[in-house]
Image: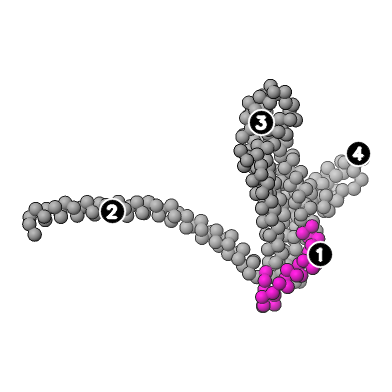
Amino acid sequence: MTTRSLKLNDLQMPQQVKKSTSKLQFGLRRLKPALYFIPFLILFYLFQLAPMLWVVINSFIYEGQWSLENYQEVLGSKFMLQGFSNSLWLSAWSSLLGLGIATLLVSSLRYVDSKVRNAVIAFTNMSSNFSGVPLAFAFIIILGFNGAFTLLLKKHGFIDDFNLYGKWGLLAIYVYFQIPLAVLLLYPAFDSLKHDWKEAAALLGASSYQYWLRIALPVLTPALLGTLIILIANAIGAYASVYALTGGSYNLVTIRIASLVSGDLFLEPNLAAAISVLLLALLAFITLINQWLVSRSYNANR
C-alpha cells in the first residue's frame, strides 16, 4: 500500500466516524421524547388500564368459574335497574340544567367588564373544587329540614315541604357542582364567536334570536355536545356528596358498587365489577352518540 493511499484512508476515517456519530446523536434526539413519555405510560397502565382490565376480567368470574351469572343477576334485578334509572335521571337533568345555566352565564360574561369577568371565573374555579362531604354539609345547613333557607321559604309560604334527601334535593346538589364545570369548559369555546358576526347579522335584518339560532348555536354545537357528555360522565360517577348526604340509602349505581365492595354484610366484588362494566358500556354508548352528532354539526360540514 502506497503512502498516498494511507493518507487518503486517514482522511476518510474521521469523516465516517463523524457521520456515524451524527446519526447516533440524531437517533438519541428522537428517542429522548419517548423516554420522557415512559413515566406517563407507566402511570396510565397502573391507574387506568390495569384496574379496567381487572374489572372486566373479574366481571365474568362467578364462584371461581367463568360465567355470565353476574350480568344476569344485575340485569334481572329490579333493584339494580332502579339504581341505573335513578343515576341516569339525575345525570341527564342535572347536565341539561347545568349546561343551560352555564351557557347563559358565559354568554353574558362576554359583555361585562374584564374585572367582573375575571372575578366570576375565579369564583367558578374555586367552587368547582367544592364537593364531597363539605358540599353535602353546606346543603344540609342551608336546605335541610331545619336549614336556614328552608325555614325562610316555609315562613313566607313559598314551599310546604322540601326533602333534601330525596331526588329533588339530590338534583339541586348535582346542578350546583355541574354549573362551575360547564362554565370552565364553555368559556374558551365562546371566544370563537366574533362580535362582527352579530353586527353583520343585524345589518342584514336578523334579530338576536335568529343570530343565536342560525349562527352562534351551530358554531357552538360541538362544544355544547362535548360539555354535555363530560357533565353526564361527571354526574353519573358522583359518589362522595350523595353518600355523605343520604348515607347510602338512595339507590344509585355508585352507591351500589361501593356497598358491594366495602359493605359490612355482603362483599361481592365480582358483581360490582359487572355493574362497573355496564356503566362503562353506557358511557361509551353516550360518547358514540356525541361523536355522531358532532360529525354532523356545522363545523364538521364546513
Q: Pointer 3: what residue?
A: 110
Alpha-carbon distance for marks 2 and 1?
69 Å
Q: Which residues are magenta?
A: 59-85
> For the residues carrying marks 2 and 3, which lies nearer the camera in this image?
2
Whether residue 60 is in magenta: the answer is yes
Q: Say which residue appears at 23% left-offset and 54% top-offset.
A: 16
Q: Position of residue 88 (x, y in %)?
A: 76, 54
Q: In the displayed structure, does residue 72 sit left or right of residue 292?
A: right
Q: Say which residue appears at 60% left-offset and 66% top-offset.
A: 53
Local secondary structure at mark 4: loop
Q: Position of residue 272 (x, y in %)?
A: 71, 66
Q: Which mark is residue 21?
A: 2
Alpha-carbon distance for marks 1 and 3?
47 Å
Whether residue 18 is in magenta: the answer is no
Local secondary structure at mark 1: helix
- The answer to which image quadrant residue 198 occupies is top right
Q: Quadrant of the C terminus?
A: top right
Verify CB contact (< 8 Å) between mark 4 and mark 3: no
Verify CB contact (< 8 Å) between mark 4 and mark 2: no
Q: Amino acid at mark 2?
A: Thr
Q: Say which residue appears at 67% left-offset and 69% top-offset.
A: 59
> For the residues carrying marks 2 and 1, which lies nearer the camera in this image?
2
Work out whether residue 121 can be spotted.
Answer: no
